[in-house]
Amino acid sequence: MSPHSVIPVLEFHRLPGSRKSVHWDLGVYTYQGAAQIGRAKAPAMIRMGELGEPKLERLPVLVKLHEVIEAELERGVSPNTVRAKLKNLGTFVSWVDMRQKDLCMQTLRECYLEWCGHMTHRYRVVKDISHEGAYATVAGPAKIIGRALGYINEEPGRALLKCSTMVAPKRHKKVLSTKGDKARQEDLFAFGSALLDICNGLSHDEILRGAHMNLNFRNGSSVYLKGKGKCWISPHGKDEEIEVKQSFVNLRIEAELLIFIAQTGMNLAQVESLRQCQYRWRSDGDELDAIRVYKGRRGGEVVFRCFREYRNHLRRYLDWLTAVGLREEEELMFPFIREFEVLRQCSFSATKSLCARAGVSHVMPGNLRKARINWLLRRSRDPGLTAEQAAHTKETLLQVYEEPHHQSASIEIIRFHKKTDPTIRPPGSGICVGAERGPESIEGIPENAPEPDCISPEGCLFCIHHRDVMSSDYCWKLASHAELKKLELTKFRPPKGEKKHPAQTVISRIQSKLEAISQGSEVRAQWVRDAKDSVRSGVVHPRWEGHVQLIEVL
């Protein structure tokens, strides 16, 4: 029996792709050098015998890896994630081939750890790769290799990496200033407006009209588009077929996909595989509608919420799909077309190119989702609620998606001090010991006295939460405040029958406080005398100096 005949087909049929794409087959890695050649050319060279005889000792390793990856696909891991792991796994096998190492179940762990050391040497010494790039390359296949080796803990990849010389790079979150955050928001709004302009410009009638068109954007720019590629559609389900430019169709679908991600917060892999019959709308209050979809990784339905206004836009998009004859194509929500076949993958090259020509910054799906999550987080100030809306755990939200923001941090610091600091600076002189409980008048407050409201400094003098400060500076503040009120009385011309001016009540309250302080001790009495002398000589406290100067010029 020929050694070639015992090599099983280790393909992954659950990985979506076009009919012309080359399927992933781990069986080719039994041949020395197949990983370096690439999966597109390797099968033909194997059939021609250019790669020699297969190394059958590798077969148990490849079969085990195939089982682990199939299990991940069954569990609902994103196809894009699996492709990335397979690509890095090919890099690992290619390195094994170049080093002429034996790859079997007994040497798999040793080979992987040596490969990690090689990648560590590259970013530390050779410096031909970044730390982040090296870590991503070895961390990709770590989990599947760990499971193949029999690691039974929850994080087999992390457990395996701990045995290597590779360390995870430190993650530095970029702090946005007020100016930087405002500029990013402006870019997001401009990008969203550009996407709407694309959708409105590529209507059914415009697509059928010709092979070129001009797209007008709200920023005043106009971009000339020349259609590429041909496809035949059956508009409105008719028997006749009409030739249109597939680049126009794909551009509209690409823009709609980005809007959908920005509104719902779904990740790209979920959206690409979403079918038109797979989602359900459910009213959720006055502002939001909910889209419920099945998430394999969670093993159940998850809810993605969006603003109700988007429902009408999505309905127009579905009507457009029906009009161009794509509503029934595999029932995909976003059926990209290439060479008469429906694809799921999208590189966003069309919108990138168009936005560059229109002078608009392009935003990728991951950044759209992150911007949406951070906007919701800053608006609600509730990580639990935001995590629920984004279909994440609270830990994932705070560790991965939250971005530091100095304005939000300032608000949180202020709230923290309001809750923990027993003394809060009030509007007037002295200190406040009950800001969280709200203002409350003293017992027996005069009829025309200012009401405490945590806003006016006069009201603080009649609040039960106000406390005096035994210091010369506080006495100076009180005396200066009384002088200000006296100046107000000189400007007051009461009508007949007018009651006592509130300023007189404030002056009496301040004088009683100064009298009580002076009776405490000889030192305090000296504070009060010095404060009154300073005010009589025209030297008022800086806290009230501006107010006094203003009323003097009136």
Image (cartoon, grey):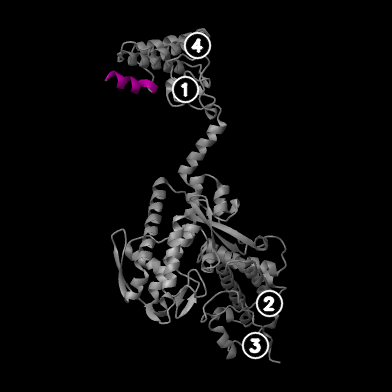
- Whether tag 1 and tag 2 are in contact, CB under 8 A, the answer is no
Query: What segment carries the magenta color?
Result: 543-553
Q: CA distance from mark 3 to mark 2?
A: 18 Å
Q: Secondary structure at mark 1?
A: loop
Query: Circle 3: is it few (<14), some (14-19), or many (20+) Cα within 10 Å?
Result: some
State yes or no: discs 4 and 2 in contact (Cβ < 8 Å): no
Which label belongs to residue 57? Answer: none
Q: Specify the label residue 63 is tagged with.
A: 2
Q: Residue at x 53, y 20 (%)?
A: 464
Numbered disc 3: secondary structure:
loop
Q: Quadrant of residue 207?
A: bottom left
Q: What is the three-letter code of the residue carrying label 1?
A: Pro
Q: CA distance from mark 4 to mark 2?
A: 88 Å
Is 457 positioned to the left or the right of 332 in the image?
Answer: left
Residue 254 x, y percent position in the rendering = 43, 67
- Closest to the camera, between mark 1 and mark 2, is 1
Residue 241 appearing in the image: yes
Q: Which residue is mark 4?
A: 517
Q: Which residue is mark 3?
A: 53
The amino acid type of the residue labelled 3 equals Glu
Residue labelled with disc 1: 452
* Residue 267 drawn at (x, y percent): 52, 62
Residue 348 seen from this side = no
- Which badge, 3 or 2, comes first in the chain's sequence? 3
Mark 1 or mark 3: name the one nearer the start of the chain: 3
Is residue 139 positioned above or below 395 on the image? below
Q: Earlier in the sequence, mark 1 or mark 2?
A: 2
Q: Could you tell me which residue is drawn at 34 percent across and 72 percent down?
A: 205
Q: CA distance from mark 4 to mark 1?
A: 22 Å
- Residue 549 in magenta? yes
362 and 495: which is toward the camera: 495
